[in-house]
Image: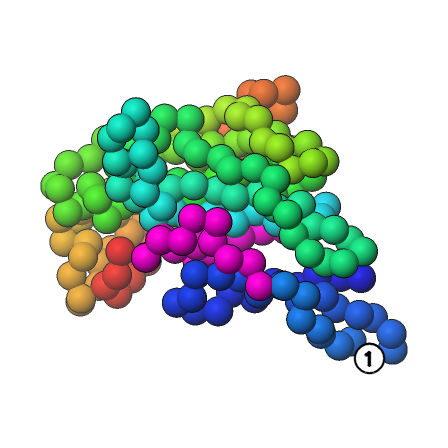
């Protein structure tokens, strides 16, 4: 039995289908997965914030508000890990993961990627820092976790953005993890203060190739793609 997942736009839940292969492929409804912590605008399972491998489903909720020591961190983000029962297709929440250092507007869980026992989680702080007119590469980073067969996650390491990229750029705009190789998309915006206009803006796009091994990460290659004009949005 194979499992397929479908996010219904603008709704705070996820739909799980099972695919039965018997000559013709058919889909049957298995389960509706609700946000464990319902919250307006939490971005639960939005866009690239879900991945599945080895009967594990990982779902990001990047705009989740987190309370730490009595203080509310707005849009700090959280990632949920579910264990899938292969016989029924039903999911059970196994773990909830927060950023190693949660912060306001960190948006931890903007995208998730799992391969084997490795999980990659990105943050997306661009909107916050562009609007505030400040930038650094302090939190422009990607976090890696080890996941066991029960869905429990253990923090492994953090990959920092190159010095020339900042939170107001796009380190981790997309990721792909296969075996010990991690590919990260980055966009280096040339006019930070004008990036939110509706007329489009110029950015240098690139791919960064890393080798992840023995709790360390080495940059293998940087592939410059081209200058790209994007239109509006954050």
Q: Give me the residue at 62% from left, 33% from top.
A: 152
Closer to us: 226 or 107: 107
Instruction: Point out the image quarter for the C terminus.
Output: bottom left
Instruction: Point out the image quarter for the N terminus.
Output: bottom right
SS of the residue under disc 1: strand
The part of the image, by quadrant, that contains residue 178 is top right
- Viewed as shown, does residue 138 lie left or right of 87? left
Residue 172 covered by magenta stretch: no
Where residue 58 appears, as percent x and y from the top left, is 57, 47
- Viewed as shown, does residue 194 lie left or right of 160? left
How would you classify the magenta stretch by its main secondary structure?
loop
- Residue reaching furthest to the front: 70
* On screen, residue 128 above or below 1: above
Where residue 146 appears, as percent x and y from the top left, is 61, 30
> Which range is magenta?
32-52
Q: Give me the residue at 87% from left, 78% from top.
A: 23
Closer to us: 90 or 148: 90
Where residue 120 appears, as percent x and y from the top left, is 53, 38
Residue 40 covered by magenta stretch: yes
Residue pointed to by mark 1: 24
Q: Give me the residue at 34% from left, 37% from top.
A: 66
* On screen, residue 163 above or below 231: above
* On screen, residue 19 above or below 66: below
């Amino acid at each position: 039995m194979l499992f397929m997942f479908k996010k219904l736009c603008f709704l705070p839940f996820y739909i799980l289908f099972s695919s039965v292969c018997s000559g013709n492929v058919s889909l049957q409804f298995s389960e509706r997965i609700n946000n464990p912590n319902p919250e307006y605008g939490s971005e639960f399972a939005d866009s690239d914030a879900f991945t599945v491998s080895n009967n594990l489903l990982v779902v990001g909720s990047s705009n989740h508000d987190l309370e730490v020591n009595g203080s509310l961190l707005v849009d700090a983000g959280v990632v949920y890990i579910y264990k899938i029962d292969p016989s029924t297709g039903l999911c059970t929440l196994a773990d909830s993961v927060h950023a190693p250092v949660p912060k306001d507007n960190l948006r931890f869980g903007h995208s998730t990627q799992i391969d084997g026992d490795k999980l990659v989680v990105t943050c997306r702080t661009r909107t916050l820092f562009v609007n505030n007119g400040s930038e650094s590469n302090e939190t422009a980073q990607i976090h890696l976790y080890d996941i066991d067969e029960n869905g429990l996650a253990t923090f492994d390491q953090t990959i920092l953005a190159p010095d020339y990229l900042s939170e107001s750029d796009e380190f981790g705009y997309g990721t792909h993890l296969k075996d010990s190789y991690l590919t990260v998309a980055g966009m280096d915006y040339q006019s930070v203060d004008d990036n939110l206009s509706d007329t489009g803006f110029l950015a240098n796009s690139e791919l960064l190739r890393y080798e992840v091994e023995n709790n360390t990460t080495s940059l293998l290659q940087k592939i410059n793609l081209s200058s790209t004009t994007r239109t509006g949005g954050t």
